[in-house]
Image (spheres, grey):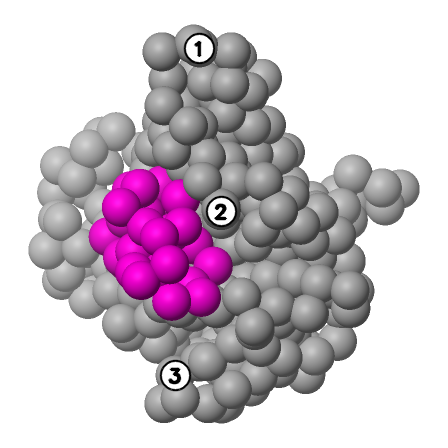
Amino acid sequence: MSPRGVGPRVFTPADQARDDAFLLEPFEEFLCFERNLSDRTVSAYLHDCRGLADFALRCGSDGPGAVDYALLQDWMSELASLGLTASSAARGRSALRTYFGFLVQEGHIAQDPTERLEAPRRGQPLPSVLNVEQIACILRRAEARARYLETLPDCSERKKAAAWRDVTMLEVLYGSGLRISELTGLRVPDLHLEDGLAMVQGKREKARIVPVGGGATRMLHRYLGDWRPRLERPRVSKGVVFLNQRGGQMSRTGAWNVVKAAVQIALPKAGKLGIPILTETTPHTFRHSFATHLLKGGADLVAVQEMLGHADIGTTQIYTHVDRTYLQEEHRRYHPRA
């Protein structure tokens, strides 16, 4: 029984071995009897420390003395990538600082590795991203829907054209990393498809040139030649690239609905493939995925900053933290002593 009835401490022999290796039982007693913390706080601190211990063991560290600053950073990044809120991450940091402070005080380790560990910035959670397979699944299902509608004799030409418009919008979102307002504001003269580029009006009317991507360029060629003319109404369309079925400019809400519908269509197939997609996927998720996949592929951070239209490179750097989980996975998969 845990001190003061906090609850069962371990569940398996492996859990007991972990707690012994990381001195979690004496730490629990310290929290209860010397710090006199509440049962809830003790339970939360132990949960956080056990999580770190499990992570450290997976990384090859057999006790707290083998945990260094880099491993702590990786652990905090993994928590963030799993969707932990900033307040919960801050509590985790507090638990680790208390834990390692206790170990130093008791002479179990010589140096506290949490001294340089920064608190997570509140109000700026790491963005959710889709992996390449999930993106591909959404695009394939959207295209399959458009092809299916083409076979229906009772389906109107405008509805068929709108389905292909949706496919094109998804390709451009992922291929260029545009914000939703930038996507809906694109005009035909802004496109330079022979060069695979587009001129975009970003925040505060700041213009920038962005690559569009091969898949998006091919779809735009087909959309502008075959499908947009079916939606266009000369007095209404005014050169806008993406049109609604009334011939006017797609609204932000309309574009959000395109993404929402595409995700819903892709969910069953993604589940069967073992790549489940979050139902909360939004147009901005495509932008986050665009940036993360570029950096994962080795793109220069400054180049990605320019493509995204970020005034501050610090905003772009958040995607390097998103990608850290991938680096950990690759290390564990291929390093002989991972």
Residue 238 visible in the shown view: yes
Please tell me which residue lies in front, 27 or 85.
85
Q: Is residue 134 left or right of residue 161?
A: right
Q: Is residue 88 left or right of residue 282?
A: left
Mark 1 sits on what residue?
152
Q: Is residue 183 a member of the stretch shown in magenta?
A: no
Q: Which of the labelled discs sits on residue 203, or is there none? A: 3
Residue 328 spot, x, y in % from top left = 68, 51
Dot 1 or dot 2, earlier in sequence: 1
Residue 134 visible in the shown view: no
The answer to whether residue 176 is above or below residue 25 is below
Mark pair 1, 3: CA separation: 41 Å
Residue drawn where x is 47% and y is 59% of the image:
241
Residue drawn where x is 41% and y is 37% of the image:
162
The answer to whether residue 17 is above or below residue 212 is above
Q: Secondary structure at mark 3?
A: helix
